Amino acid sequence: MPNNTFYNEILTEHNIRPFHKKKLENPDFTLEGVNPSCGDDIILALKVDDGIITDGAFEGDGCAISQASCDMMLDLIIGKPKEEALELADIFLRMIKSKITDEEKDRLEEAGILEDISHMPARVKCAVLGWHTMEEIFKGATEGSATTEDM
Amino acid sequence: MSIDVNAIRKDFPLINDEVAYLDNAATTQKPECVINAIADYYRTSNANPMRGLYKLSVAATDAYENARAKVASFINAKDPSEIIFTRNATESINLVAETYAKASLKQGDTILISIAEHHSNLLPWQKICAENGCKLKYIDTDDQGKITIEAFKEAVTPDVKFISITHVSNVLGTKNPVKEFAKIAHDNGAVILVDASQSVPHIKVNVSDIDCDFLVFSGHKIYAPMGIGALYGKKELLESMPPFLRGGEMIDYVTRDSATFTEVPHKFEAGTVNVEGAAGLAATIDYVNAIGMDEIAKREDMLTDIAFRKLSEVPHVKILGSSEASDHHGILTFVIEGVHPHDIAYIMDSDNVCVRAGHHCAQPLMKHLGVMSTTRASISFYNTEDEIERFVRSVAGIRSKMGYAE
Ligand SMILES: Cc1ncc(COP(=O)(O)O)c(C=O)c1O
């Protein structure tokens, strides 16, 4: 049985006042991620310099979980090399699908609060949307749109 | 005699005072008598209907045909043979599209539907248009969620040969004047199908009075089991149509290369049919008739009125469609400023209130209304004023739970 405490302050704060929700000037990569089953829709934009993610932002529309998750992801990956960002995405996706170690969870910082999503199948796609879109960006796609249908 | 709601609620095993079930437009809960009718069929009358010449098979056939006659009289069709059993409204619409429309519509003809159609009453027509070279035309709802008779008349141009339109919208709750629409259609030589999925469970529907050519509904939205639905069609039309699916029970005579098809309705019911579903649907009809469709409509209108007034008073909430409660027919679709519908439905679940969130299988309508997705509460006569209170209280608490100051 779900309870309200899931919508804790960290989550609602990232949803109501997302720090990274804005337009990014001259991004190196942009990709739209859509979650067709519930209409979450984000456009992720990243600046990458010499393999380092120097800046990032997102625009779009969706539920609190999709928005907050994307905002927390950007908090975490800006300033890091793209390899490390992909590693973090892998940890995050594994956290949502099954289990991770405590050290791994520490590396996700605030994003670790989304661990309980694994018990809510209907919301998994929302939580992974931003992460999945970031992975798609680095796995080659620079244009078009990513979906979470294959999750 | 007005409804004794406490007694009624005891008829439904999944209706209780803990969880307020307000997703009745998606599917309704089932009363014991319907559940028992299904079990009784298997306990007393099960055999493959039509095939056998022994008593048990006759009993199964009787159960099935008795259900057909009940549906016919429930919607006031002239003859039981005008009722075809299907799986649901979706299959009923596909049947008409793939038989009547596919065989009779030509290049340059137009199919008219409304912007408020469920995807079930849209996708089959998109397909026929693509295959037959027809045009798909939409009629928009106005700012009150309505389609006026004048607007409808204007949309029915001479090229419109087929019209498929909902009776009550599953998103806005608005009721179309389908009797007037049918007259306009016929005056213009067009054939009209009415999607009664959201009207049959809530108001008395009379196909002879409406004078539509086809009408469809699903059993599961009117307290019957899932997997049984109905198509009503005027006899002359049904007789002129080619079969839908092919196989057993729908032929008179088969040779190596050809077959002659049996008469309606069996022509459209290939293969072994859903007798338990039909038996459940028959039990549902007895059940709602005993209460009275007029009483059901009266009570649902009363609850809708309370819900509409209270929900309208909640700050930051906007109800879609008409500003009159009486136009909503048990359906209230709303948005809360700053909160996504999936978060709303999730929080309401933790308050034990079941509502629907999403696009309600009506994406073109969502686009027309300028919203991505919405939340919908839908009422049945077994709901109570207390449940409506709890629903409104839960809605009122959502913004603060999502971190807004007020
Ligand atoms: C207006 C309308 N038409 C058609 C349908 C499809 O019904 P079913 O899924 O039972 O075929 C629905 C159900 O949501 C509906 O509300």
Image (cartoon, coloured by chain):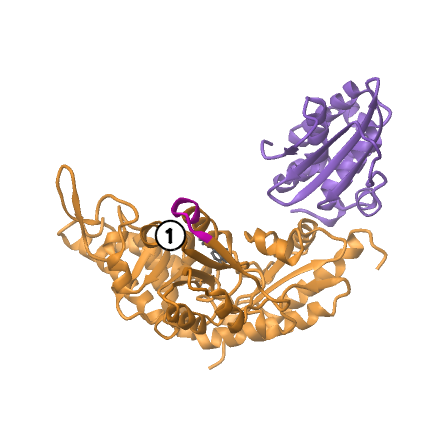
Residue A111 image offset from top left, x and y in percent: 78, 34
Residue B311 falls in image quadrant: bottom right
Q: Find residue A142 and report its image quarter.
A: top right
Q: Any idea which chain is the orange one in this picture? A: B
The CB of the residue at mark 1 lies under 8 Å from ligand 1: no
- Residue located 69% across and 34% down the image: A128
Residue A49 at x, y percent in the picture: 84, 21
**Image location of residue A86, percent across then percent down:** 74, 22
Residue B345 can be seen, yes or no = yes
Question: In the rendered view, does B245 fall on the left or right side of B174?
Answer: left
Residue located beneath label 1 in the image: B97
B173, above or below A125, in the image: below
Magenta stretch bounds: B129-135
- Does the segment drawn in magenta span residue B364? no
Camera-nearest residue between B51 and B126: B126
Left or right: where B158 falls relative to B326: left
